[in-house]
Image (tube, rainbow, N blue to C red):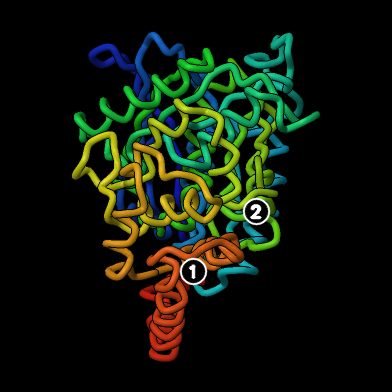
Amino acid sequence: MKVLILQPTGSQKVDGYVRWSCELIRKDGQQVRSRDVLWFEAPEHDQAALQADDGEPFLIAALMQAMKEARDIEVRGRVSKMLLQNLEEYMAFWVATAPKVFSSVQISADMVSVGIPDSVAGDPLGTEAAMAAFSGGLDATFLAWRHHTGRAGWRSRQIRFFVMLSGFDIQYNESAHVDASMSNAIQTLGSIGASLKTLRTNLRKVLDVPWNHLHGTALVACMHFYKHQARTMLLGSCEKYDDLIIPWGSSPISDPLLSSSSLRVIHDSAEFSRSEKAAGIADWPAGQAHLRVCWLASNPGGNCLKCEKCLRTMANFASQGLPVPSSLGGSEAYLNKYIFRTKLRTQPQEAEWRAIAAAGVGRKKSLWQYWVPVMLAFSKLRRAYYVATGQGARAGVNR
């Protein structure tokens, strides 16, 4: 029997940070195959917290690793019955949509709780107050502005604070990149009176799951360390409802299934494409001025202006007839110069560029727009070749 044991080891203070750790123990029968330590840490002044017996963030974080290895999970801690129920459905979604990658596993916990834990039961605002992760990207920036301005209608929420995470696209030890990105985010959120907290993790160092599958559970796991301050998490959408890519790590189908009795997860803004989100922040100068969409560290805290993600975000604005923000070069010159070098490597990238092309119909074409159909055709041929030769992962088909 193959098992992944999650053994939370409590918290400790290290140089102004609080670190929560969990030992990941793989056992094949009675033999211990490996031991790893998964950790999350936050500055003491951010008041992040987790009860000593709470195993939920570690379970959520490690779930897809166990599914990939077909290992049952034993949690040496407390998990809510609601989360266990939801995770069974979450696994069903992934087994149905990526059957070659994931298997359904059994989950057991030393303690299974029913109802709302005491740590959050006294929250006077209940689930009305919310928190959200903030990367500085277009999705997160649109989410912040949408709720600040009340444009989400009855769904608009008071976002108590945002959390910037390192250990994802920015590695936690890339201090220059982390500090510059935080500075930009603080300026963006400060313009609407919102506060920013920070958390870092070694999650991507110890979990061997493709990031396009893992990012949803990774985000939710991190936010559990703030659930005593806000019991609802808003998770910004990736794709639009009518153009979903399945399977993908975050979607309006799967994200709510990561909710527990102490933290509700809401997938937000899926009625908008990224180009529509660009138009949605056209009246927020600070939001545009400090956009950070690039994961490369060549320009710490900023954008390289050459990669597919940078060029795509420029095109999101240009396709709406909007000027390219200064944070993305300030003109379409970079887009026209580097579009010819761009290769699309995943299906979501293809979907994004198709939507951009559709958004620009009826407007006077720039040089870059003539290249988009060619780029999409090359990508389609490339994907067909890799799928035919059994190399689906290289074509962004990982299911």
Q: For residue 266, what is the image quadrant?
A: top right
* Residue 249 seen in render: yes
Q: Looking at the image, is 93 positioned above or below residue 63?
A: below
Mark 1 surroundings: few (<14), some (14-19) or many (≥20) residues within 10 A: some
Residue 350 in the image: x percent, y percent? 49, 69
Q: Residue at x 49, y 39 (%)?
A: 219
Q: Residue furthest right?
A: 154
Label whose residue precedes the other's in the sequence (2 or 1): 2
User: Is 266 placed left or right of 9 in the picture?
Assistant: right
Q: Residue at x 29, y 37 (%)?
A: 302
Q: Amino acid at mark 1?
A: Glu
In the picture, the disc for residue 350 is 1
Residue 73 in the image: x percent, y percent? 52, 49
In the picture, the disc for residue 219 is none
Q: Could you tell me which secondary element the residue under label 2 belongs to?
A: helix
Q: Residue furthest bottom?
A: 388
Residue 52 in the image: x percent, y percent? 49, 20
User: Is 355 placed left or right of 300 in the picture?
Assistant: right
Q: Which residue is mark 2?
A: 90
Q: Residue at x 30, y 51 (%)?
A: 34
- Between marks 2 and 1 in the image, the one whose residue lies nearer the viewer: 1
Q: Could you tell me which secondary element the residue under label 1 belongs to?
A: helix
Q: For residue 42, what is the image quadrant?
A: top left
Relative depth, front residue between 205 and 31:
205
> Count the marks: how many?
2
Q: Amino acid at mark 2?
A: Tyr
Q: CA distance from mark 2 to mark 1?
A: 26 Å
Q: Residue at x 45, y 25 (%)?
A: 286
Mark 2 surroundings: few (<14), some (14-19) or many (≥20) residues within 10 A: many
Residue 246 in the image: x percent, y percent? 60, 65
Q: Looking at the image, is 207 positioned above or below residue 92?
A: above
